[in-house]
Amino acid sequence: MVVYEDNHLLALNKPVGWLVQGDRTGDATLTDWGKAYLRQKYAKPGAVFLHPVHRLDRPVSGLTLFARTDKALSRLTTAFRERRVEKRYLALVLAAPPAVSGELRHYLLKNTKSNRAQVVSASESGAQEAVLHYRWLGRVGEMHLLDVCPYTGRSHQIRAQLAAAGCPIVGDLKYGAPEPLPQGAVGLHSYSLSLEHPVRREPLLLKAPLPEAEHWQKVEAQL
């Protein structure tokens, strides 16, 4: 599960079904796992400082970055806010996108009751602009594989925008997929983060292996 580790950072490959941080369910989280890992590895007494600097939805797998120090957390939070971190995802979708590559630009409004992002007009109160770039990588059986790079970090952004473009993500019942995947997964994996190290100021490229689930193994066979 550990992808990268140093004195300031910890990058984990999140399994499907895990929360990054706690919610009302009280389920165990990736943050809990990371703290326990550091506590055991370094025989740390007392509390362990570990804070996620971004989040993945529960049914999404892949790279999740944590700060191990206050300095790293402050600088990474700024870097994410200023869009100096490139996030890349692989998405398995049910239909081909509108073009081989392109930009999707929508305005989203989060419905907290249904926990769903809705595409609305720019004039809608509370609407936030969501922008992503995608590239079609090929067919995987009846599915299509996309490389997705979100420029903004809206809740459920990739899932809502791809559905609005007519190519919902495999297994994503909330956004139009007709059938579920095992463990409530959706075909979306955070596979790459490119950023400047918050302390050493060196370029850092992190990559997370694909899950072992059947739908991703079909992708692995074609990459």
Image: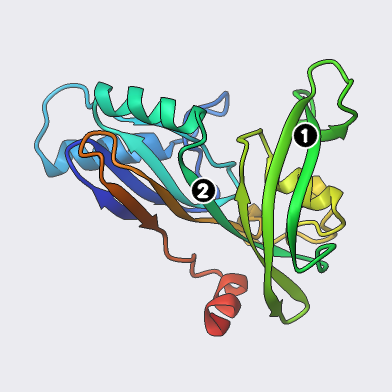
The tally of labels here is 2
Q: Residue at x 18, y 36 (%)?
A: 39
119 with respect to 198 (left or right): right
The N terminus lies in quadrant: bottom left
- Contact between marks 2 and 1 (CB within 8 A): the answer is no
Which numbered disc, 2 or 1, marks the residue that appears first in the sequence? Answer: 2
**Front: mark 2 or 1:** 2
Q: CA distance from mark 2 to mark 1?
A: 20 Å
Q: Residue at x 57, y 71 (%)?
A: 216
Where is residue 194 drawn, in percent x and y? 41, 50
The vertical placement of 55 against 192, above or below, is: above
Tell me the kind of residue under disc 1.
Answer: Ala
Where is residue 106 drawn, in percent x and y? 81, 38
Tell me the kind of residue under disc 2.
Answer: Lys
At label 2, counting other C-alpha atoms closer than 10 Å, the crowd grade (few under 14, some 14-19, many 20 or more) is many
Q: Nearer the viewer, residue 177 or 71?
A: 71
Mark 2 secondary-structure assignment = strand
The vertical placement of 144 against 78, above or below, is: below
49 with respect to 28 (left or right): left
The vertical placement of 36 against 216, above or below, is: above
Q: Residue at x 61, y 41 (%)?
A: 151
Residue at the disc numbered 2: 87
Q: Nearer the viewer, residue 74 or 24?
A: 74
Where is residue 168 drawn, in percent x and y? 80, 56
34 with respect to 48 (left or right): right
The vertical placement of 29 against 4, above or below, is: above
Residue at the disc numbered 1: 117
